[in-house]
Image: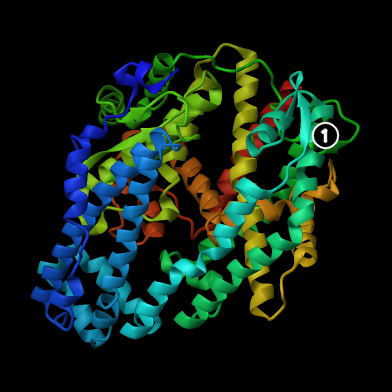
Amino acid sequence: MQRNEIDKKYLWNTADIFESEEAWEKAFSALENPQFAKKYKGTLNRAENILSYFRAEEEYEIALMRVYLYAHMKHDEDVSNSKYSSALQKVIQLFTRLGSETAFVIPEISSLKEEYLVAFSKDKSLADYDYFFKRLVEKKKHVLSEKEERILAEVQEPLSTAFEVFEMLDNAEVDFPEIEYEGKTQRISHGLYSVILNGGDREKRREVFEKYYSAYRKIVGTLAATYYGNVKQDIFMKNMRGFKTSLEMALFEEDVDASVYKNLVNCVNDATPVMHRYMALRKKMMGLDEMHIYDIFPPLVENADLRLSYEDAYETVIKGLAPLGSEYSELLKKGRDERWIDVYETPGKKSGAYSTSVFGVHPFVLLNYQKTTHDVFTIAHEMGHSIHSYFSQREQPYAKSDYKIFVAEVASTVNEVLLLKYLLNTTKDKTLEKYLVSYFLEMIRTTLFRQTQFAEFEETAHAMAEKGEPLNKDNLSELYYGLNKKYYGDALFHDKDIEIEWARIPHFYNSFYVYKYATGITAAVAIADKILKEGEPAVKKYFEFLSGGSKTDPVSLLKIAGADLTAKETFASVMREFEEYLNKLENYT
C-alpha cells in the first residue's frame, strides 16, 4: 500500500515538530552559523558566565535537534527520497560544526582549580548542572588542552572510516550467492538469510547458512583488518585520554562501576551449564541426532502466533502493562490517539522499528506492523522507550533529560516481560503458553547470553591488541569459536563457519555497547518481578527511575528501581528465572 493511501491515524504527525517544510527551512537557516567561541571563549570562569553559555548552547542544541528529528523522520518515511537524504546530511554537518565551535568549553572549564568546580556543583544557580560538574571533577585528568581537544573533535570523522568501510562491505559489496527459495532463484540478503534460518525447512537452513558464510569467508581478511582498525581507534583514544584499557574508558564515559561488567560476565559464565541444558532440550524437542548452529533459530513451537490486527495488538499491550498503573495506560492511549506512531510498512520506508524524541516535543515511534507475536511485543518495546523519554523530559531540565545508553533498553524490556507474563497468565491455549515460555527463554538466550558472549569477545580482542598482538582473521576466529563452544556446550555441533560470525556484527564498531543489552535485560527482569510481587510501592520506585533522566549515574538510578547491578544476586536471580522457565518447558515434553 502506498503511503498516501493509508488512513492518517496510522501515520506519525511530523507537524508536531514543524508545521511545514518552509518552517523547517527557516529554522535550519537560523542555525547555520553558530558563534559560541566569539562570545564566550575566555569567560568561563564565573558562575554567571557559565550559566549564560549553557543556556545559549542548550537553546541552540534543542533547535538543532528539532531540525534533525524532522529531517530524519521524513527521510525514514521514504529512504529513496534524495531530498530528505540531502537535508539530513546538511543537519549532520551542523552537528560537526557545533562540536568544533564548542571544543573550547570543556578544556576551559576543567582547567579551573578543582575547588572552583566543586563550588559550581553546589551553586544553586547552576543546580541543573550539578551532575555535570561532579563528572567534570572526575574527568579533569582525562581532559586535554583546548588545541588537543579540537584536534580530537576534528579527527572523529576520519577515525570512523573503519565502520564506514564495514558498512559498505556488509550492505553493498559482499558477494552473496543465489539460492532457490519459494519456487524462484533469489540472491541471498541479510533479510532473506534471517527468514530462511527461522523457517522450518532444515535442508534449506543448512544451505543458506553455508552459502551466507561462504561470502564472508572470501573477505574475512579484509573484515579482520577493518575491525582491527576500529580497535586501534579505541586504543588511540584511551592513550590520549590516559586510561589503562579501552574497557575502562568505555565504562568511565557512562559512569558505570567496573563491578557491573565483571558481575555480568562472571554470572553468565557460571550459568552456562543451564544454557547447555536448554540446548540439549532444544535438540530433543526437535528430534535431532545432531543439532547444528542453523537449528537453533526456528521457533520450538509452531503455529502459535498471535495474529492480531494492530488495534487488537495495541489493546493487548495496554492490558499487559496495566500493573504500571492508570497514568501509564493513559500515556499509551495518548501515543496511539495523538499520532506518535507510524504503523505500517510502505514502499521505501525504513525497515525495523525505533523510538525517537527531542526535548519539548512528544516522542515518536516507527513500526512496520505485521500480524505476528513478535510485532505485538515490538509495540510494547518501543512504547517503553517513548514513555521513558516522556517522563525524563517532563521531570528533568534539558541538561539532565537524556538518559544514558546504559539504561536505554530497561524500560522497553520491562514492558516486554510484563506483557509476556500477562499473556502467560491469561491464555487458555496450551500451545500458546508453551510458545511464550520458549519465547522468554529465547529472549534471555539472545539478549543476555549472546550479548555477553559478544562482550567477552570485544574485551579479549581489545586486550590482545593493547598488549601489542596484531589482530587477524585467524586469532579473531579462534577466539570467537572458543567462546561459542563455551556458551552453547556439547549438545550443539559447532559448525566451523560460525568462527567468522564476529566479522558480520555491526555493533562491534561501537565498542563495548553490546554488554548494555545484557545488563538491561537483567535489570528489566528484576524490576518486572518486583512490580508484579510488590505492586504500587515498586511501581512508584520504577517511575522515579523513569523520571530520572541522567540526574545521577545510571547504576544508582537502577538501584532506585530495585535492580542493583553491583550485587551478584541481581544477576543470579535472573539466571534462576531462566532455569525456572526451562523447567516449565521440560515439563511440557
Q: Is residue 106 left or right of residue 342?
A: left
Placement of 34 over or under 48, stated as above or below: above
Extreme residue toward the bottom, this view:
113
Around disc 1, counting alpha carbons within 10 Å, would you say few (fewer than 14), some (14 to 19), or many (20 or more)?
Answer: some
Task: Judge whether residue 486 can be spotted in this image.
Answer: no
Q: Is residue 348 left or right of residue 447?
A: left
| Number of marks in picture | 1
Question: Which type of secondary structure does the marked residue at label 1 adopt?
Answer: helix
Q: Position of residue 331 (x, y in %)?
A: 27, 30
Placement of 386 over or under 329, stated as above or below: below
Residue drawn 82% across the image and 41% down it: 210
Q: Quarter-wise, where is residue 278 in the image?
A: top right
Placement of 128 over or under 518, stated as above or below: below
Q: Quarter-wise, where is residue 461 in the image?
A: bottom right
Q: Nearer the viewer, residue 55 or 448?
A: 55
Give the quadrant of the C terminus.
Answer: top right
Q: Nearer the viewer, residue 537 or 141?
A: 141
Residue drawn 67% across the image and 37% down it: 189
Give the quadrant of the N terminus.
Answer: top left
Q: How is the image coloured?
A: rainbow
Q: Position of residue 501 (x, y in %)?
A: 72, 51
Extreme residue toward the right, this view:
289
Residue drawn 54% across the image and 27% down it: 374
Q: Position of residue 574 (x, y in %)?
A: 57, 44
Residue matched to label 1: 207
Q: Is residue 227 left or right of residue 45?
A: right
Q: Amino acid at mark 1?
A: Glu
Q: Position of residue 72 (x, y in %)?
A: 35, 43
